[in-house]
């Protein structure tokens, strides 16, 4: 890594120029091939302040179509002000199929700065490294091309450049206090960058480029990029192999074993509803105040009563502090990205409650059964989802997942009722009837999902909903109890 | 307005409860009708701090499907920190067809707070009132249902409520310094709210509700909402009549009058390109530093050379400070909103440069000619666009619009070249050939567009592009000169 880095030998200017020209030409030709092959490319460019990251990007893109790429420079937001998970800015920025994104510093810069500034604990830093490895692997497995470059200059060179920037009236504002701090702490940064790169080098390797000689760096970066694209175009889109990491799981019953007989009397329902909603209303204040993020996912059979259940949970909440996201089939710009993207971008700010009406589990249910993704894709998804959810709970989110359960007869009765009641007819479509025919396949898929993704940090709750009122009370009770636990833990952490 | 407000008489509790129940039932039934009629509804709820806006919303929505509405509470961001135009947070929040949005305080709160805190000048305050009137009218004309409510409590009541919130450990954090300041300045706020409402009452009228009696306010708000929706459902979607406001216009030639013969020698091209790109590179630093927003729109004939032109302008820019937005046909979630929404949401942050490759002028070209919108829609659009662009330049944006112009023979030659050159074939589609057949209709539409929308604040520039190199230099020169002017003006304003 950096400590063993040897600077490049000087090269002949003319030869270098010719090489760069040739590589740029190849990249230009690749644009259209990438578009046709629908391959997305993410280039992560990390490196020292004043190493020349911006101008390196400029030189790489100088001849390609500006409609084809984007450059994103996510700010490193102080931990105290950040209202989203660590990976959120990067996960939100991933390119569409056929497009190219440059991240002008990204997850490494953020993690390294925060650990050196003691904004995050050692444990949290390790968790972030793990998340980064997961994130990179998920992108690769989803067919993304990733190129990770570190642009290196030594301490002396950094001093010279910062000085010269400071002395020019047009550029002095570009030298930030953070840059100066990095320069003072050069050796610390060097060691930490190195550690970070070593810890994240296995899935997608790092490439260290010499920032002292600008043209050489341009040539080397172009070569890496063009070769990576050529290789991918030759091989076709990569589809990752399924594998299962061990997550601490909670044992779930099979759906067929669930006793659907529980009911509640009208009197008890009213009383409990009022009581639980009152408690939830108070809890929401604490959640908001203490900035705890809450995510509640609803899945379940058609006509199981998800809508009415969500309404009872939402009613006591302050409408400014929660959102309900109905998840329908993805739009084109969503389909053109890794499947979790449309959930990443819908995450609540900390302190907010977000209810998903259907979730990312579509991947292992409808997408699996309707063939909207490959077998490898949905088989890989169990693990990808477990990782995603751990990233959310690592962030501090309370994450609850409800399977709203009914039996097939109850569904039939409700379908018939909808069909025969004019005001309810819009709720029932041909698709519902078609899905109903696939009940056994869905049941198998749901059983597998519950078994593989009910982790300790993000458990599934089966909500018996043959009696809708019973189901509402049960869901509300879980929400209230889990939020009470979360608030208690928060206070314990804060006040010891 | 507020100064003449008379509080409601007490009403019988039971009767009120029954009325509310009946209205909620009607609203529930309307959900599905709104969805079918694809009508979007925006409810702006303004009012005093502690008047009970949040709980009013909660009561209105308590029985409707949470997938059907959203509640948005845009923060009032201090003027010095705001990186977007005044209306940006509200324009970004407009609902999709068939959905309902509650704005828990909006453009009035923001404008009133900022004028009272002297964050904006009197002139700017007036401009904002004008923008609000334009924005509301555009939404109405585009078929949106707008309901504007002010929730009123008197000074004494506000004191009581703020006091009681402060005394409860769960709610004390809800009382903000801004609330206390409002209370101290109650009379000033009263006067300014009144003025603002009088100034924005003509297009969409205000409704002042009595916040002293919660249930009465709920009933009255529900009644207003339900009646508005019923009326709209009965009449069908409103389509506004075209009308033309006077804007100071720059006289444009007809396309047929444009002399397309200008060319540039290769030697001059190279020299000028280098010189202009150097100047632009330095200017970009100032733009970034001084936080001047820049928007450049490209329109032109197919094969006119937009892409290559954009690339020459983009090349000298710092890639972290600009974006190119290629505008294709709208996706479903974009089609389901007012036509400017997808441009509002793509505006640059101040200090950034945003290049649109095709723009909002699609409305008066392709959408007009292909019948993607009604005649009234595109005829209204000239004025709507002029207003939108004035809102952008009022914000301080430099807004340049290029028509990249070639003649029909040149287009034919370039089409044939693309067809016959394997690497270029992807650039030409059947649609291009079909569009070419409509050249005369397009020419008529472009002439009308240039005539009606070349305003002094956002002029059109016709770029003769039979010689692409000439066109690049001309466009670059305009960009450089206009940015130089903008920087000079900025310095003049700042340093006198």
Image: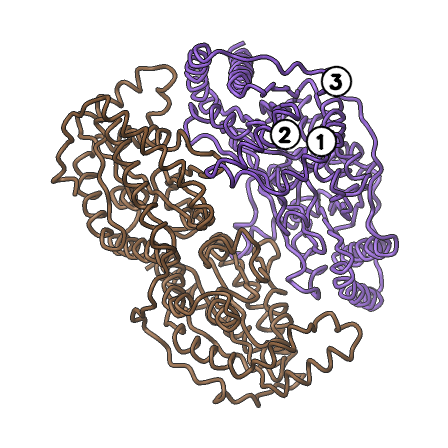
Chain colours: A brown, B purple
Single out the mark in the foreground, 3 or 1. 1
Q: Toward the viewer: A332 or B12? A: A332
Instruction: Residue B250: give x, y in percent of width and height.
Output: 72, 16
Q: Which residue is mark 1?
A: B439
Q: CA distance from mark 1 to mark 2?
A: 9 Å
Residue carrying label 3:
B248
Q: Which residue is mark 2?
A: B301
Residue pictured at 81% horizontal, 28% vertical:
B244
Q: Earlier in the sequence, mark 3 or mark 2?
A: 3
Which residue is pictured at 43% across the width and 85% down the height?
Answer: A253
User: Is A164 displayed left or right of A470 in the figure?
Assistant: left
Closest to the observer: B417 or B284?
B417
In this rendering, which labeled residue sits more in front, label 1 or label 2?
Answer: 1
In the rendered image, the quadrant that contains the N terminus of chain A is top left
Q: Are marks 3 and 1 in contact (CB under 8 Å)?
A: no
Up-down relation of residue A16 to residue B18 (above or below): above
The quarter of the rendered structure image containing the C terminus of chain A is bottom left
Q: Earlier in the sequence, mark 3 or mark 1?
A: 3
Task: Kindly give the residue lying farthest to the front in the view shown.
Answer: B420
**Circle 1: element type:** helix
The subunit carrying tag 2 is B
Chain bearing tag 3 is B
**Residue B490 seen by the camera:** no
Residue at position x 57%, y 66% in the image? A357
> Are circles 1 and 2 on residues that touch, CB within 8 Å?
no
């Amino acid at each position: 890594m950096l400590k063993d880095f040897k600077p490049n030998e000087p090269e002949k200017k003319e030869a270098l120029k010719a090489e760069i020209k040739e590589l740029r030409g190849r990249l230009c030709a690749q644009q259209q091939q990438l578009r046709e092959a629908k391959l997305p490319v993410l280039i992560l460019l990390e490196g020292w302040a004043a190493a020349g990251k911006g101008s390196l990007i400029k030189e790489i893109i100088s001849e390609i179509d500006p409609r084809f790429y984007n450059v994103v420079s996510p700010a490193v937001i102080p931990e105290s002000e950040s209202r989203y998970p660590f990976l959120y800015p990067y996960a939100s920025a991933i390119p569409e199929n056929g497009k190219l994104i440059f991240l002008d510093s990204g997850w490494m810069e953020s993690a390294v700065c925060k650990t050196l500034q003691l904004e995050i604990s050692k444990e949290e830093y390790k968790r972030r490294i793990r998340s980064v490895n997961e994130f990179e692997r998920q992108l690769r497995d989803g067919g993304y091309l990733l190129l990770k470059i570190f642009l290196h200059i030594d301490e002396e060179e950094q001093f010279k450049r910062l000085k010269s920037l400071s002395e020019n009236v047009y550029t002095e504002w570009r030298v930030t206090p953070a840059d100066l701090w990095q320069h003072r702490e050069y050796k610390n940064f060097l060691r930490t960058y190195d550690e970070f790169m070593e810890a994240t080098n296995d899935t997608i390797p790092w490439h260290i480029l010499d920032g002292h000689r600008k043209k050489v760096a341009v040539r080397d970066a172009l070569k890496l990029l063009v070769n990576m694209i050529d290789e991918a175009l030759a091989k076709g889109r990569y589809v990752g192999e399924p594998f299962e990491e061990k997550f601490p799981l909670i044992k779930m019953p099979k759906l067929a074993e669930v006793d659907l007989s529980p009911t509640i009397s009208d009197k008890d329902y009213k009383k409990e509803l009022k009581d639980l909603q009152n408690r939830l209303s108070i809890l929401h204040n604490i959640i908001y105040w203490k900035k705890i993020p809450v995510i509640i996912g609803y899945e379940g059979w058609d006509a199981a009563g998800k809508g009415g259940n969500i309404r009872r949970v939402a009613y006591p909440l302050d409408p400014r502090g929660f959102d309900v996201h109905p998840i329908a089939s993805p739009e084109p710009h969503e389909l053109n990205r890794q499947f979790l993207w449309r959930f990443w971008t819908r995450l609540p700010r900390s302190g907010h409650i977000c209810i998903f009406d259907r979730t990312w589990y579509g991947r292992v249910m409808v997408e699996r059964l309707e063939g909207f993704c490959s077998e490898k894709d949905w088989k890989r998804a169990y693990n990808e989802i477990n990782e995603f959810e751990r990233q959310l709970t690592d962030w501090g989110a309370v994450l609850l997942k409800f399977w709203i359960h009914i039996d097939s007869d109850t569904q039939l009765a409700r379908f018939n009722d909808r069909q025969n009641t004019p005001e309810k007819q819009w709720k029932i479509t041909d698709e519902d009837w078609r899905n109903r025919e696939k009940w056994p396949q869905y049941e198998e898929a749901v059983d597998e999902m519950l078994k593989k993704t009910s982790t300790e940090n993000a458990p599934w709750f089966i909500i018996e909903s043959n009696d809708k009122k019973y189901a509402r009370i049960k869901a509300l009770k879980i929400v209230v109890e889990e939020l009470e636990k979360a608030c208690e833990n928060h206070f314990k952490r804060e006040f010891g």
